Amino acid sequence: MCGLIGFFNGCDLKLACPKAALGRCEKTRGQLPSAFRSWDKKASVRSEVSRVSSIENYLFPEAFVPVLKSEMLREASADTKRALRAAALFRFLNFTHKLELLVVNTVTLNIALGRYDFDLSDAARLDAHRLYVDEGYHAYFSFEAMQAMQSETCTQIPLNETTPEFVMQLQAMTEGEADPRRKALVQLFFVIASEMLITSTLHEAQNLQDMDPALGQMIGDHARDEARHHVFYRSMLIRIWDQLSHEDQLFVTAKLPELVAAYCMPAKHEQKAELAALGFSDRQAESILDETYPTGSTSEYAWKVGAGLFRTVRELGTAVVGDCLDEKLNSLKI
């Protein structure tokens, strides 16, 4: 589904399988059909009108603002809830914009150009071009909506562009590897991990009563595209796994839980600043965030949305790979 899933940590979780929705559920290393066969007709960039000009209410549904379930905010004023819903939407759009341009399309570009030392078909590289266009379009309409919010939304909380936490975590993990090849593997598997996370949250967003219809349609367009991207990157994992050395298989397996967790880490620093702008003290803000994201909840959420990814790695790898994955999953509690 893609790394957007990480944004919804703290919301009620519902799982779904985009591969099943597309009628493709590959479980072997056999033939891997393209998920982009109808791309010219079905991709949102090719088939849907721009949604941003039709959005009237730039607010996220309350279900997507988990701090509102905390005891201190449960009975908050309508203005406070409205400000937090607007801030959450802006963070989501900023998360999407940076994810697509700084992370996903950096790796997708390298696949399209054949820069990785893997045997990939011309058809797979062509699909990577299509995926690159999709993600660029997602970044475009997210940024367009961000600009509209900055000019049209009156709120106590400043709507500022930021670098999301997961981008900084990826930079730190990449810089921590001395071997350039290992750096590239971290970046590649960061994207594979994010694109294979599974939830139906985005699909169901468009049906929520407190979601602006045009905004819901925009998110729905994105979700339909991401179902194809999930299939592409799962197929990519299957294609390249046997081309990795056993040492590299163990390396990326040990990294996977950390990569998935990085996407699912809540933006506590940004949310603390939002609460401060509404007049909450540091202690009050920390109390709200601690209640919203108790210890262990992030890893629990991450392992659930990453279950399909972890299952695929177990199916592809040896018993040693499975043991390595289990050890890492059991050792991380965030």
Image: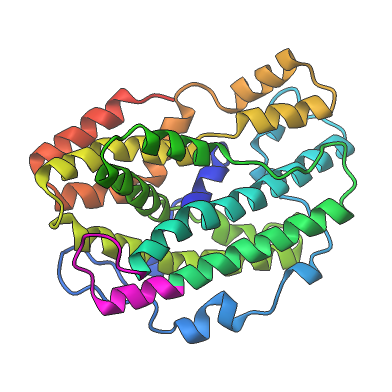
Q: Is residue 240 left or right of residue 259?
A: left
Q: Position of residue 208 (x, y in %)?
A: 68, 57
Residue 230 in sight from this viewpoint:
no
For the N terminus, which image quadrant?
A: bottom left
Asked if residue 29 is positioned above or below residue 2 in the image, the reply reads below
Q: How many marks?
A: 0
Q: In front: 159, or 215?
A: 159
State the residue at coordinates (27%, 60%).
Answer: 116
Q: Is residue 24 left or right of residue 202?
A: left
Residue 78 in sight from this viewpoint:
yes
Quarter residue 176 falls in: top left
Asked if residue 265 is positioned above or below residue 123 in the image, the reply reads above
State the residue at coordinates (69%, 59%).
Answer: 143
Quarter residue 80 falls in: top right
Name the image colouring: rainbow
| Residue 123 colored in magenta in the image | yes
Asked if residue 157 is positioned above or below residue 132 in the image, the reply reads above
Q: In front: 103, or 330?
A: 103
Magenta region: 113-130
Q: Which residue, as the protein is rendered here, is positioned at the far top?
A: 283
Q: Position of residue 105 (x, y in %)?
A: 47, 60
Q: Position of residue 238 (x, y in %)?
A: 21, 60
State the residue at coordinates (29%, 31%).
Answer: 329
Q: In front: 22, or 148?
A: 148
Q: Is residue 62 left or right of residue 135?
A: right
| Residue 44 colored in magenta in the image | no
For the C terminus, which image quadrant?
A: top left
Q: Position of residue 79 (x, y in %)?
A: 88, 38
Q: Is residue 41 left or right of residue 239?
A: right
Q: In front: 125, or 42?
A: 125
State the residue at coordinates (68%, 22%).
Answer: 288
